[in-house]
Every structure is written in C-alpha cells, then in structure tokens.
Image (cartoon, helix red, strand yellow):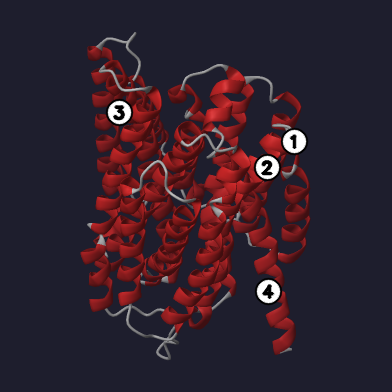
Amino acid sequence: MCKAETLKKHAVLFAILIGAFSLVLTNSAFNILLLTITQMYGVTTTSGSWTITLYLLAMTVTMPLTGFIVDRLGRKNAYLCGLSLYGFFSLIGALFYQSFFILLLVRFMHGVAGGLMIPLSLVLLFHFYGKEVRGKVTGVWGLLLTIAPAVGPTVGGIIIQYGDFKYLFWINVPFALLALFLCWKQIQFDRPVNKKRLYTQSVALMMFGVGGLGLGVQLMSNPTFPLWAKSAVMFGSILALIAFIQKEKVQEEPLIRIGLLKNPVYAVSIILSAVQASVMFGVIFVFPLLLQDVFHLSPSVTGALFLPTAVCTSLFVWIGGSLIDSGTSLHFIAVGIGLIGFSVLLLALVSKEVSLLVLVALMAVRGIGIGLSNMTVTTVGLSALNDSDLHEGSALANTIKRLASSVTVMILTVYYDLRWQAVHQLGENADRAKWLALKEECILLGCVMLAMMPLALFLNKTKVDVGVIDDSK
C-alpha cells in the first residue's frame, strides 16, 4: 500500500512538472533570440525586448489572481486552465508567427499561463508531499525548472540556425497535450471553495501600476516622447502601485497577502529570491548580446554555452535540497550567492579575446551558485509559513520575483541602447561601445548579488522547520 502511494505521488510529480518544464524551456529559448527577432521583424532592440518583458509582466499580473482563480476553480482545474492556454497559444504562434503583433500576443498569453502554472506546480507538490521530504521534492522541482532556462537557449539556437522559427511553438503542442492528459488522470479533484471576493478596483490599480511601470521604462529610450509624458507615466504607475498596496493591507480578502512579509524569514527569502531572479534574467539578457553582437558567435554556439550552467545547476540543486532535509547549516546558501556574484563580475573583466573555456568555467560556477541558493531560498521561505498560507505565499513570492525581473530586463535594455549609442557617438566603434555597455551591466549585476550575502547569512541564524517532522501537529 505504501509503495502504491509512493508511485502515485511520483506520477503526480511527473505530470505536474512536464508541463511547467516545457513552458519554461520555450520561454528561455527566446532569451537568446533578441538579435534574431530584431533582424527578422525589423524592430529595435527595445521593441524586440518586449518578447521577454511582456511574458514577465503577464506573469506578474496573473500571479496575484492565482488565489482567487484557485478559489473559484480548485487547484487541479486552475492548473489545467494554465496548461490549456499554453497549448492553444503555442498553436496560434506556430500558425501565425510571421506577425510581430501575434508574437507579442502569444508571449503575453504564455506569461498568463506561466502565472498560473509555476506557483501552482509547487503548491500542488507540497499538498502531496510532507515536510520531511519537501527539500528533495523542491530539489526535483528546481532541478527541472532551472535546467529548462539553461537548456532552452541551446534548443532555441539550434532551431534558429538549422530549422525554422515556427518550430519554437510547434514543440510545445505535444508537451501541452501530454501534460493535460496526465494531470487530468493523476491529480486528485478538489472542490472550489468559492469564498474569495474579487475587488475590481484593486485589480485595475495593479494592472495599471505594473503595465504603466513597464511602459514608462520602455519609453525612456524613445526620443519621440517628451520627458513630461514619460515622467507622468512613471509617476502615475508608482502611485497606482502604492494605492494598490494600501488597499491590500486593509481588505479582508486581498489579492496578495502583503501581511505575510511580517514573517522575517519569509521576507528575507523574498528579497533574496527577487534579486536572484533579477540577476538571472539580467545575465540571460546580457550574455547572448555579448556573444552574438560583440563576439559574433552563432546562435547555436551561444545556446551551447548555457549547458555548463544547466549541468552544474542540476547537480547542486539536488545537493542543496538534501542539505536542507538533513537539518545542517544553511551557510551554503551564502556560498552559492557569492559564487553567482563573482562569476557575473568576472564576465566584466575578461577581454574580447577570451577563450571559450574560460566562459564555460564562469557559466559552470554560476550554475553551482544557482543550484545551491535558488530553490533552497524558496524552500526556506515557504516552510516558514503555515500550510494554509502556502497559496498566498507562493503567489506573493512569484509576483515580486517576476516584477523585479521584468523591471530589471527593461532597465538593462534601455540602458544598453542608450549607453552604447552615446559611446559610439563619441568616436568608439560599435562593437567596442556595445562591449563597454555590457561590461558595465555585468558589474552592476554582480555587485548587487554580492550585496545579498549578509541576508543569506541571516537565514542560518533563524530556526525554520524545513524537512523535519513536527510531532506536535
């Protein structure tokens, strides 16, 4: 009986993760294709970057609504809804990819699907597995969802160089259908609670704030818009976000539980996760531009250079989960964060004639750091909450991470466009100007990551029930 239950849990694990893995894989494949997209559709780097930022912004807006959607549909149906959106709009993208507008629409809807699937995937797994093995389960979850963004660039590079752009969408369709079937068969049905109210004013404030912030940052690189208009959009969106947060604090049924941040361990894990996600997406933005626009490497070679990160992440994310379950010191999280910071900083110090082996080594070190710190921080933070708060805690954490990541990518995009053009106008050649702009961004990302090490050490000082059975319950 016990063996049958174990097999049932593992079947649920496979069913949940296959859809989430393919979604993240496809998304990450786009991260190295910015140069290809600008050339293919004849748009600027800033316009092309909307294929990345729209996905992140859509996730940011959707994740706070996850709790309400689960309340109305139940966990299983909400996850199936996300899978259906993912599969349907992949089909739309495959058929009508020639239109840049359709591409942006598909990327936005994939972000909506991701906003449902990513937080719910972990919550569903936590529902099936007890605290005594959550570290290992989170390790498997993190293993796949961190391998995907590392392998995705390789897949994207190979498809673009040797295939056709539409295949980036076609490969999603069988994954989505298989995941739909398995999740429908394996995940137990849960009845909707129908207790939460949807406050339309809060939703409108959130959408205006998040969308306006993204638009405002992007407009900063557009010289045709007057400064007062750009400032008005930015100022208005910030006011909307402040008003949204104030309303959420006093509402009985908020979209996101801001009050959960009163838990110090959870709050620190949110800060660390947001910075980690921002640096990860920042590097994913910077590195392909560096290799393709400056070093003039092919998309397939650029994608292949992400494989060392994937291999090392897959190994050390499992090690990190096992260390959490063993109840040992959490100092390894600070070590992982330090490795990420130093590896990104060193990217800024290499010369244009650097050997590919050095780049491989730096990407491997970054993978070790991600494996040790990324999913472990998430596990520690969520385990500091009550089980009844896991839905809201996961949604809040992912909302903040995606918002931070999208704003970071937009800022880096705008800075890159403005900075290299300014340097180029001073007499530097284009490659040198782009190289200098990217080096400055690497220095910034690395320093921000290293500044998080004291917060990581704080987690080690706090007693958290992770991976330990509590007999009092």
Left or right: 315 as drawn, with respect to 249: right
Disc 2, SS: helix
In x, y percent, where is residue 436? 31, 34
Disc 3, SS: helix
Amino acid type of the residue tagged 2 in the rendering: Ile
**Earlier sequence position, callout 2 versus callout 3:** 2
- Label 4 sits on residue: 10
- Label 2 sits on residue: 158
- Label 1 sits on residue: 163
In x, y percent, where is residue 294? 44, 33
- Label 3 sits on residue: 237
Q: Are marks 1 and 2 in contact (CB under 8 Å)?
A: yes
**Earlier sequence position, callout 4 versus callout 2:** 4
Across the whole image, how many numbered discs are drawn on residues?
A: 4
**Earlier sequence position, callout 1 versus callout 4:** 4
Residue at mark 3 to residue at mark 1: CA–CA distance:
41 Å
In x, y percent, where is residue 166? 72, 32
